[in-house]
């Protein structure tokens, strides 16, 4: 019997190795489409951006040779650079606070409602199915002082949705909140449903109020979800482009130019310098990496606490 077992051992190990090899090949085959997608649509363009940032590269002329690091001082010296950074940070702060707060509020409303839960969830989530560019075009018509449904009312009040810097900012924020609040509600709802009901029952038995339950149970146990949604919202807001490009074109008086729109303007409207635009893109990428690292570390400490 021992001889038989000794003979089967190597055979079984060879068969196990073959099965592992087959599983490994299968896994690589499943991962191949994603790998090709990442290489072609992320790594290759990223390499091209770094090449542009280090080159003298006009829009109509191709690569004229190495121009490193002259493009970076030119990017920072752009007369709209500082204003676009300040405006982007301002917009990011407003949009993040509103989206996270409203998303959490809507999630709590849907969770508490037993009769209308399905209807409310669907109603709040419907705007998220619309593309951002399409939503921006829709609101562009709504805000129109000529053809919009509120044209007569705004004319009588002497008000325009996009006529002043503050009005343009808040009108765009309203669009973003309408478009993304349902999406963040869904993320928050997933986090809320992960909190055990027994914890709430114990709090009710102890006589905790709704506010105490929310403060001492919901918020602490929802920290991982809050961290995820905040990182996503901050990153998306810092890269804002479509909504401002469609609604305001950076106006009025260049007051709503975001950093990404500045990159577009430098590349295609004005200097037509892909090298400087590439340098701006590298600066934005570096800033995003630093900001996300800081956020992730800060939220990791809070979650551990």
Image: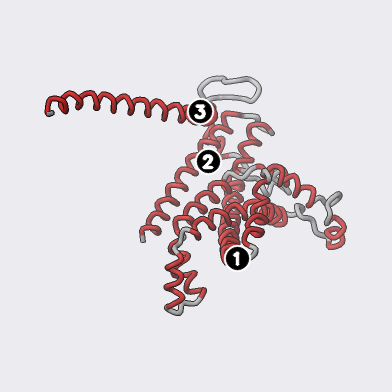
- Residue 148 locus on image (x, y percent): 83, 51
Cα–Cα span, label 1 and label 3 = 42 Å
**Res 186 label:** none
Cα–Cα span, label 2 and label 3 = 28 Å
**Res 114 label:** 1
Q: Residue at x 54, y 53 (%)?
A: 187
- Decide: few, some or many residues near mark 2? Use Cα within 10 Å; few <14, some 14-19, many ≥20: some
Cα–Cα span, label 1 and label 2 = 45 Å
- Residue 219 locus on image (x, y percent): 47, 64
The answer to which of 118 and 186 lies nearer the viewer is 118
Q: Would residue 72 be found to the left or right of residue 155 on screen?
A: left
Q: In the picture, which quadrant includes the C terminus?
A: bottom left
**Quick one: SS at disc 1?**
loop
> Mark 1 or mark 3, which has the lower sequence index?
3
- Residue 100 locus on image (x, y percent): 56, 58
Q: Which residue is mark 2?
A: 284
Q: Is residue 231 visible?
A: yes
55 to 270, vertically: above or below: above
Q: Would residue 74 be found to the left or right of residue 219 on screen?
A: right
**CB atoms of marks 2 and 3 within 8 Å:** no
The image quadrant that residue 224 belongs to is bottom left
Q: In the picture, which quadrant includes the N terminus?
A: top left
**Quick one: SS at disc 2?**
helix
**Quick one: SS at disc 3?**
helix
Which of discs 1 and 2 lies nearer the camera? The answer is 1
- Residue 223 locus on image (x, y percent): 45, 59
Q: Residue at x 69, y 33 (%)?
A: 269
Q: Which residue is mark 3?
A: 33
The answer to which of 218 and 52 lies nearer the viewer is 218
Q: Residue at x 50, y 59 (%)?
A: 193
């Amino acid at each position: 019997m021992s001889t038989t077992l000794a003979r089967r051992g190597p055979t079984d190990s060879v068969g196990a190795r073959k099965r592992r090899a087959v599983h490994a090949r299968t896994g690589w085959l499943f991962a191949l489409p994603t790998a090709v997608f990442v290489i072609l649509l992320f790594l290759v363009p990223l390499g091209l951006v770094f090449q542009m940032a280090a080159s003298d590269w006009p829009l109509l002329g191709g690569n004229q040779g190495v121009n490193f690091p002259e493009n970076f001082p030119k990017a920072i010296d752009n007369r709209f650079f500082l204003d676009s950074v300040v405006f982007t940070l301002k917009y990011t702060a407003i949009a993040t606070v509103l989206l996270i707060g409203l998303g959490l509020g809507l999630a709590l409303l849907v969770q508490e409602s037993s009769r209308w839960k399905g209807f409310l969830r669907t109603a709040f989530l419907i705007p998220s199915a619309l593309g951002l560019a399409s939503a921006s075009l829709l609101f562009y018509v709504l805000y129109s002082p000529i053809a919009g449904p509120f044209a007569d009312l705004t004319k009588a009040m002497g008000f325009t949705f996009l006529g002043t810097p503050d009005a343009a900012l808040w009108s765009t924020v309203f669009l973003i909140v309408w478009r993304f609040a349902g999406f963040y509600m869904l993320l928050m709802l997933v986090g809320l449903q992960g909190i055990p009901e027994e914890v709430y029952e114990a709090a009710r038995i102890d006589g905790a109020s709704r506010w105490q339950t929310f403060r001492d149970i919901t918020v602490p146990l929802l920290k991982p979800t809050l961290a995820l949604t905040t990182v996503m919202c901050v990153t998306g807001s810092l890269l804002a482009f479509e909504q401002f490009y469609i609604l305001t074109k950076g106006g009025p008086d260049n007051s709503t130019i975001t950093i990404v729109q500045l990159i577009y303007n430098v590349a295609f409207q004005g200097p037509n310098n892909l090298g400087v635009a590439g340098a701006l893109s590298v600066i934005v990428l570096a800033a995003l990496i630093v900001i996300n690292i800081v956020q992730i570390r800060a939220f990791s400490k809070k979650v551990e606490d």
